[in-house]
Amino acid sequence: MNSLVICALLSLAQAPEDGVRVRLEHTSGGILCSVSARNVSAREALAAVAHELGRELTVTASGGDVASSEPLTIELLDRPLEDVLDFISGSAGLRVERGQAHLALGAELAADAPREQLLQRASNAWQRAMKSFPADEQVAAALMTLASIELERGDADKAREYWGALIDNRPKSELVPTAIYNYGRSLEQVGQWRSAVEWFTSLANHLAADELREAAWLELSRCQAHLGDARQVHYLMDTLDAEFPVSTADGQADRLLIRARAWNTQKLPVDALRCLDLAERTGASILDGREFTALRARALELYGMPEAGALAWLGFSLDAAGHDLAIALEEAARLALVSGEEATAILIEAMATERGVPTSDTTTIAAQARQGLGLKLREAPHSGSPAARLNYAEQHLADKQWELARGAIASLIPDLGTFDEETRTRLAIVWANCLATEKHPASPTALNSAVDFLRETVRSLSDLEHRRSIYLAAAQLLEAAGDTAGALNAYGGIL
């Protein structure tokens, strides 16, 4: 008999269970598996595979009596191991999971299984499909689906990785414009306006983005409005209105809100209020959101009527909840204080407490109001959400109340690396300013501690804007201390 035939027969080694032959081949792309079996249960087949892998097959409690499944006939040749495991277990209505030292066989997930388990199962399936068929034209669709799964799981960073992979690796796919749009929108949602501008500019110039051209210009206008480039906003909005007239109430209101933000940026509140009045007449549902009230209150403040802005926020707060409620009461209290209504600011703090709003800026503003009225101050909050404590610290830093700022965030600093980059940057700037004034504003030791802290923080940041904020903070501290050379280096991005 030919020696190659003998080797082939020997390689299909028979596992302990009769009737199942398994061969494994380790390649650079993973393990390929061949299985040949007649009239065996899924458990017998998987036990043979586990034996060849040097692992134990275990059955979870949810797996029930897996031995009672219908007999299977299996002929699989040089298939990826994951595909083989899924085929055998799936044929019996089961699923198998790989561990370091075992394979776990159990019941397939039910439709009412925990959401996270279902999403993870879907993600695993799509990733295996892409790995098995990397050149398939459906890879682009798979990447879009994986991005959607990550968004459902609340991981926008991972979703952006998948969109970026689609854009870089499948540049001719018809899904690329949608991926660019989604990438830009996800950056908008976390306030990374400048980065989002780059993506929407790319989309607006994309040759295959005709269906998304209007959306690209609209989001580009929105970003520029938040960045304060009012001239560019008006140009883009004029172009949009000419090229893509809109008839829906929500569409009209959205464009008017973008223009209103631009007018506020230019400190032209009358024009902003005119846009907001026109938007209100549309009766659009988006006007129920926080943005409309924020723009109106800001325009009224610019017009010299902060008390009217405070009333606008209080009106919004009546039906608000959660974060919207906290923002509404904070802004109402701030504007009441600006308008000289200290007693109102203190009453708003009581409203926040009564409605269950956690420690927030209303506490800080009420403290300033009490100080203005000559009343006894309350102590700074050392508990509450990190966001509230950071806001508190930033306000007291602006008022040069170093100890209050320091006390609010001192317990957050040991866990600095666990926060997102924006929060980490803000915390680092406040803490460095506190360090710089710990002994004396001009103390070299205190200044060195502050700059060292900023130097360590900037190394952990990848976002360019956040790094620039750290360099700017360091430069300002060095310049205030008379270290011109050090300040110039920091302005240039060197610490």
Image (spheres, helix red, strand yellow):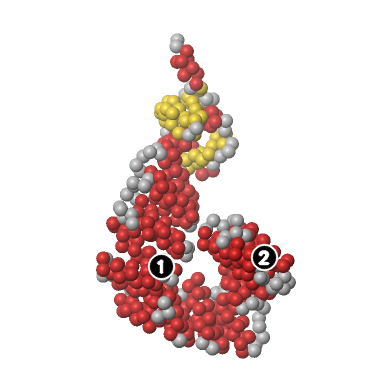
Instruction: Give the image location of residue 148, x and y in percent.
Output: 41, 53
Of mark 1 and mark 2, the one earlier in the sequence is: 1
Q: Which residue is at 38% across, 64% downward?
A: 220
- How far, Cα to Cα, is label 1 from label 2? 34 Å
Q: Amino acid at mark 1?
A: Gln
Q: Is residue 400 left or right of residue 204?
A: right
Q: Quadrant of the N terminus?
A: top left
Q: Residue at x 59, y 36 (%)?
A: 101
**183 displayed left or right of 428:** left
| Res 145 seen here | no
Q: Residue at x 60, y 59 (%)?
A: 494
Instruction: Report crowding for label 1: few under 14, some 14 to 19, many 20 or more residues within 10 A (C-alpha).
Output: many
Q: Is residue 233 above or below residue 151?
A: below
The residue closer to the viewer here, 89 or 290, is 290
- 191 left or right of 263? right
Above or below, 49 against 109 in this view is above
Q: Residue furthest front?
A: 485
Give the image quarter of residue 227.
Answer: bottom left
* Residue receiving disc 2: 450
User: Which label was assigned to residue 224?
Assistant: 1
User: What is the x, y in percent for residue 262?
Assistant: 39, 74
| Number of marks drawn | 2
Which residue ends up furthest to the top in the rendered image? 1
Asked if one can make out residue 127 in the rendered structure from this viewpoint, the answer is yes
Location of the C terminus (image quadrant):
bottom right
Q: Nearer the viewer, residue 16 or 11?
A: 11
* Discs 1, 2 touching: Cβ within 8 Å: no
Q: SS at mark 2?
A: helix
What is the three-letter code of the residue carrying label 2? Ala
The 10 Å Cα crowd at callout 2, few under 14, some 14 to 19, many 20 or more, is many
Q: Secondary structure at mark 1?
A: helix
